[in-house]
Structure formats: C-alpha cells, structure tokens
Image (spheres, helix red, strand yellow):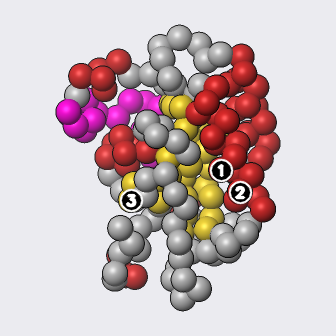
Amino acid sequence: MIPQNLDTWPPAWWVGCHGGAGASTLTRLAGFGIDFGRGWPLLAPTMPVSNVVLVCRASASGTWAATGAIEQWRRRTGMSRINVLGVVAIAASPRRPPRIATERLDLLRGWAPQLWRVGWVDALLAADDPRDVGASPDVEALRNAIWQRVHTPSKDNR
C-alpha cells in the first residue's frame, strides 16, 4: 500500500475513521491519493510527511470514531510524519444528522485543522463505481480544497 518510489508519493492519504466511512468512495471521486483503510500510515523517519484526510459518517458512531482519531493525532504519539488536513463528515442518510452527531461535529471543527461536510447522494447506493455517478458539488469543493492545501506551500505542509 505504501508507494515504493518516493517521487510518486501520494498527495493525500484518505483514512476511514470506521468501516463504511466512505474513504474508498472519496478516493475514487477525488481522483488522487490513496485509500489507506482504517489505520494511520506507519512511516519511517526517512519517508516524506503524509497528508491525511480523515473520513467519517455524520452519525453518532461515525463522529465518535472521528473524535477518537483526532485525539490520537493531537497527542502526536508516533505521528510526527503525519499532517492531518482535516475531517470529512459524509451524510449517513438524506435526513438531518442526529443532535449528538451535530454536537460532535461542532467539537471536531475546533480540534481538526478543517472540517468538510459532504451531503447524501442517493445515486451512489446503486453504483458499482462511484465515478459512474460523478462527483457532487460538495465533493468537487472538497477535492479542490484538499488539492489547494497539498499544493500550496505553508508552514503546516512541511
């Protein structure tokens, strides 16, 4: 899963905070980066910094998992080569998220460098490949925001 050639190091690593978060779908729709599954990239000191985008569902359990992941990152134990760009909260249904999920997303907004919300897309449920449906305006905005973050030099992207 880790690229052997550091010249092709991915601009972003999409990490699901829990199973079914949507990291695989976002990776395909964004068209860049690597879906790293549900674990943090393990990097040797000689490897480049990895830009990580955490992905969760906007549900009680999804936002709970995301708060745990952000807390791990904030403690920085063994994560000196990881730069979290932010958290993406994907709608868990076409309805409004439960109050507990909304409250946790408000907390995450203060803890994570960035919080992005992606709305429900019913057509994705029937698609074998999300690229057949195409990126929604939320995903387009997310893709552009992340692309700008990873390709614009700043003190946070070392």
- Looking at the image, residue 68 sits to the left or right of residue 125; the answer is right
Label 1 and label 3: CA atoms lie apart by 18 Å
53 in magenta: no
Query: Which region shows up in magenta?
Result: 128-145
Which residue is identified by label 1? 69
Tag 1: residue type?
Ala
Which residue is identified by label 3? 34
Q: Residue at x 67, y 36 (%)?
A: 64
Q: Position of residue 132 (x, y in %)?
A: 20, 33
Residue 84 versus residue 120 in the image, above or below = below
Q: Secondary structure at mark 3?
A: strand
Q: Residue at x 74, y 52 (%)?
A: 71
Q: Can you say which quadrant of the picture contains the C terminus?
A: bottom right
The disc placed on residue 51 is: none
Residue 149 occupies quadrant? bottom right
Q: Residue at x 39, y 72 (%)?
A: 2
Are the two marked residues, 1 and 2, in contact with CB atoms closer than 8 angstroms? yes
Magenta portion: prevailing SS class: helix
- Count residues near mark 1 (Cα–Cα under 10 Å), then give few for <14, some for 14-19, many for 20+: many
Q: Is residue 142 visible?
A: no
